[in-house]
Image (cartoon, grey):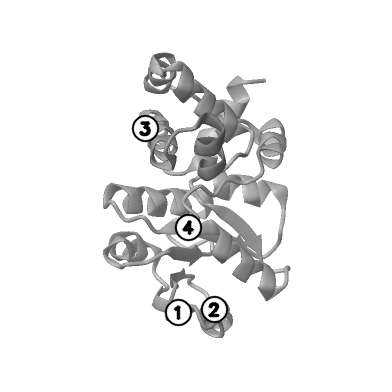
């Protein structure tokens, strides 16, 4: 049974085929589409029933974080719940920040073992996935937190006491189930609150939301 449907986007055919071999070696994963042209990928990827899109963030025509941002926005606009995991040649804080701030769930360097990529793919599909807030704060301190906007501030001001507590626990790294247990409310209400705040801020991922709110909580 295939649990994870994966898309691969990279203009480097050798890298892409290597990633595909690693992913397809797992019994519960399958690469269902590959694309080398980033412009075509942004247009066509949302049409696939996909769980994770693994993408090299530096592509010709659309460079670096701009490509990840365009892809994440295209998925969001289409109502496609697939998430993006970005990778690059090396594991650096700067590249990780650029990927996360652009909407990716996580970043994995080619210099780490294949097992790390597979572990990341399994984690990234969790609906309440969030990078450790301590790490996000470090990245924000080093490279800048994402800006807020009037719509986000208005939404935050309208939250009930319970909803405000949901956001506080979220920023402390608690998952939706844990938050629901602590506040004795359905998990769906937790997810709905976080998603509504994301939409107000025009964010496509929880990591983006956290990178904005953590800056304001300093």
Mark in front: 4 vs 3 = 3
Reading the chain from its start, which is encountered first: label 2 or label 4?
2
Q: Quadrant of the N terminus?
A: bottom left
List the residue tagged with mark 2: 23
Which residue occupies the foreground of this view, 162 or 102? 162
Q: Are marks 1 and 2 in contact (CB under 8 Å)?
A: yes
Mark in front: 4 vs 1 = 1
Gap in Å between the C-alphas at discs 1 and 2?
A: 6 Å
Gap in Å between the C-alphas at discs 2 and 4?
A: 15 Å
Reading the chain from its start, which is encountered first: label 1 or label 2?
2
List the residue tagged with mark 4: 84
List the residue tagged with mark 3: 196
Which residue occupies the foreground of this view, 88 or 77? 77
Position of 137 relative to 156 (above/below): below
Q: Residues within 10 Å of mark 2 (few under 14, many from 20)?
A: many
Q: Position of residue 142 (x, y in %)?
A: 72, 35
Reading the chain from its start, which is encountered first: label 4 or label 3?
4
List the residue tagged with mark 1: 30
Measuring 42% from the left and 17% from the top, which residue is drawn there? 160
Q: In the figure, residue 158 lies in which quadrant? A: top left
Position of 158 relative to 115 (above/below): above
Measuring 62% from the left and 45% from the top, which residue is drawn there? 97
Q: Residues within 10 Å of mark 3 (few under 14, many from 20)?
A: some
Does residue 44 appear left or right of residue 143 in this picture? left
Reading the chain from its start, which is encountered first: label 4 or label 1?
1
Q: Position of residue 144 (x, y in %)?
A: 63, 31
Q: Is residue 146 visible in this depiction of the protein?
A: no
């Amino acid at each position: 049974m295939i649990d994870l449907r994966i898309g691969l986007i990279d203009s480097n055919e050798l890298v892409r085929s290597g990633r595909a071999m690693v992913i397809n070696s797992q019994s519960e994963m399958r690469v269902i589409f590959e694309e080398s042209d980033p412009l075509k990928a942004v247009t066509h990827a949302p049409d696939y029933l996909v769980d994770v899109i693994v993408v090299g963030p530096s592509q010709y025509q659309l460079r670096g974080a701009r490509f990840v941002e365009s892809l994440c926005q295209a998925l969001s606009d289409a109502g496609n719940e697939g998430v993006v995991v970005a990778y690059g040649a090396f594991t650096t804080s700067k590249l990780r920040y650029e990927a996360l701030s652009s909407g990716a769930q996580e970043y994995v360097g080619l210099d780490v073992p294949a097992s790390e990529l597979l572990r990341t793919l399994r984690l990234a599909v969790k609906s309440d996935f969030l990078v450790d807030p301590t790490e996000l704060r470090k990245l924000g301190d080093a490279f800048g937190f994402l800006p807020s906007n009037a719509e986000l501030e208005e939404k935050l001001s309208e939250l009930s006491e319970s909803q405000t507590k949901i956001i506080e626990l979220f920023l402390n790294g608690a998952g939706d189930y844990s938050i629901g247990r602590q506040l004795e409310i359905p998990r769906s209400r937790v997810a709905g609150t976080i998603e509504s705040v994301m939409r107000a801020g025009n964010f496509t991922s929880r990591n983006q939301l956290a990178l904005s709110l953590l800056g304001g909580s300093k």
